[in-house]
Structures are given as C-alpha cells and as structure tokens.
Amino acid sequence: MLGQLIVSGLAVGFCYALLALAMVIIYKTSEVLNFAQGEMAMISSFMAFVFLDTYQFSFPVALALTLLFAAALGALLEIAFLRPAKNPTVIGMIIITLGFEMILMGIAGWKWGPDQRNLPFPIPSFETYDFGGLVVSKINFWTIVICLILIVLLFLFFQYSKLGTAMRATQQNRLVARLMGIRTKRIFSFTWALSSFIGAVSGMFIASLTVLDPPMMMDPMMKAFASAVLGGMTSLPGAAVGGTILGVVENLFGGYVSLSFKSVVAFAVIVLMLCIRPSGLLGKHFVKKV
C-alpha cells in the first residue's frame, strides 16, 4: 500500500509541480502571481476535449492544436490585458489576472455547463504495470514519466538556450536587458505563452486522472501555489521539489489519516513555510537596504 500511495502521490505531485513552475516563471519575470493559471489550463483541457470528441482528431493532432491554443491564450493575456496597463502596481496586475480567471470560468460554464466529462486519453486508467509486486496504473506511470521529462527539458531550456538566457536576463534587470538588445516585450509575451503551455499539459493530465469540468482546476491551483511557496517562488527547482513533496505528503496523509482532511495539508504547508522560511526551501531571501 505504501508504494502505491507514493507512486500515485508522485503522479499528482508532478502535475502540481508543472503548475507551480508555470506560476514561478511568471513571478520571476514580473513579480505577478497569475491566479488565472488554473483556468487557463482548464480551458485548454476543454479545447483538447473538443478536438478529440467533437472533431474526432487523432490524439497527436489534438495535442498539437491544444498546446498552440494554450500558448496563444497566454500571449493574449499579456498583450491584451497586462501590456496596456499604465504603470500598474503589483496588486493591480494580480487583480487583472483574477478578472481574467473569472472571464474564463464564465466562458467555460456558458459553453460546456456544469456536467462532468471524461477526457479521451490514449493511456487507459484501468490498466496497470506490475513492477515486482508493486502495481502501478498506466496513467500514473506515464504521468510521472512525461511530466518529469518536461520538467528536465524546461530546466535545460533556461540554462542552455539563447531564448532561455534572454528570459533570465529580462528577469534579472529589464532595463539592462533592453539596452543589450533584448526585445523585452516579446520576451514577456513568450513567457506568458510558455507558462500557459506548461499549464495546459498539467491540466490535461489532471483531467485524465480525475474529471473534466469548469471547477476542475480550483483545488490543483491552490496546491500548485502551495508547492511554489514550499519550494520558493523565485526558484524553478524549488517549485518542482515543492510540488513533488506536497503530492506525496498529502497522498500519504489521505491514505493513513483521513481523506476528509487531505486538502488541508496544502494550506498547512503554506502557513508553516511562511512562518519558518518565507523564501521557501530553495528560494533566495533578498534584503533591500534603504
């Protein structure tokens, strides 16, 4: 039982980690907490459902179209809602993301209603692998593998690609980056597009593990936020570690203590971490002298 709880916790935890990484990418760029991240992933998951169920596209085609839609949605939020704001405060930008969240939730409720659906997924949830007595569902196994690969690729992208270097330079000092020839406005748009892209992958896995409906991302979004706080809002490795830890801990708590209080773990983590180490496990604490 312990092994199965850990594996299923890892599957959910890596989904939290992807969402947390999407939030951290935005936060490192503009110091904005994008609370529309979950609803952006939810809308993208519904688009995957439309491509697969309504238009009967093959899964690779539907996946490509969904990820393109997600990237366009993220860029749209930055270009149409955030960029026109004149010298916005951080609070003002957070309010904008909350407004966008409500817009997306309203669109989903109007278009698809409250009914729960199953996302047609090529990996069956009822089939299993047997690893020497440890029985693991195929959907959990491939969720772990694919999410882990995506996390590693994301780290390699930021460390070794020119675009990743430009994004890190923009995050560190926007003015100097612009003086060095980096088109920071394009970098911001790409950052939001990449964040939405990553969130869409997480959303599709969560929809395949649970159900597809408009409020599906409300709980995972809060867990992702808790993961980012646990690992450090300024640390990409921290967000990945935080999501993994939270997924395993809450699953063990639900298995051995009570399913009724499983969701409490995430909020307890936020409170404890903010009291003990506000910068997170791997985040850096900056002190400004005035």
Image (cartoon, helix red, strand yellow):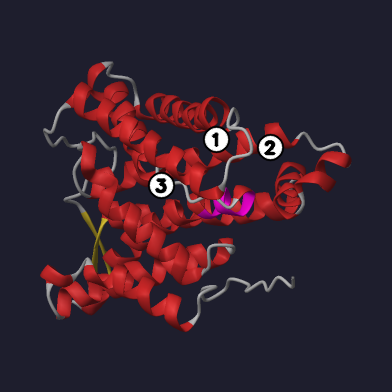
- Tag of residue 35: 3
Q: Nearer the viewer, mark 3 or mark 1?
A: 3
Residue holding disc 1: 193
SS type, badge 2: helix
- Assess whether mark 1 and mark 2 are in contact (beta carbons under 8 angstroms): no
SS type, badge 1: helix
Residue at 39 percent of width and 58 percent of height:
224
Q: Earlier in the sequence, mark 2 or mark 1?
A: 2
Residue at 66 percent of width and 71 percent of height:
286
Q: Residue furthest top?
A: 55
SS type, badge 3: loop
Residue at 34 percent of width and 24 percent of height:
58
- Assess whether mark 1 and mark 3 are in contact (beta carbons under 8 angstroms): no
> Looking at the figure, which quarter contains the C terminus?
bottom right
State whether the magenta stretch is mostly helix, strand or loop: helix
Q: Nearer the viewer, mark 2 or mark 3?
A: 3
The three-letter amino acid code for the residue at tag 2 is Ile
Residue closer to the observer: 275 or 154: 275
Provide residue 200's location: percent of width, then percent of height: 41, 39
Residue at 41 percent of width and 44 percent of height:
37
In the rendered image of this protein, does residue 99 appear above or below residue 221?
A: above
Q: Give the distance between the C-alpha atoms of the residues marked 2 and 3, in whole angstroms.
A: 20 Å
Q: Is residue 132 visible?
A: no
Q: Is residue 171 left or right of residue 175?
A: left
Q: Look at the image and say whether residue 26 sits in the magenta stretch.
A: yes
Start and end of the magenta stretch? 24-29
Residue holding disc 2: 187
Provide residue 134's location: percent of width, then percent of height: 25, 71
Q: Quadrant of residue 79?
A: top right
Q: Is residue 207 left or right of residue 79?
A: left
> Looking at the figure, which quarter contains the N terminus?
bottom left
Q: Earlier in the sequence, mark 3 or mark 1?
A: 3
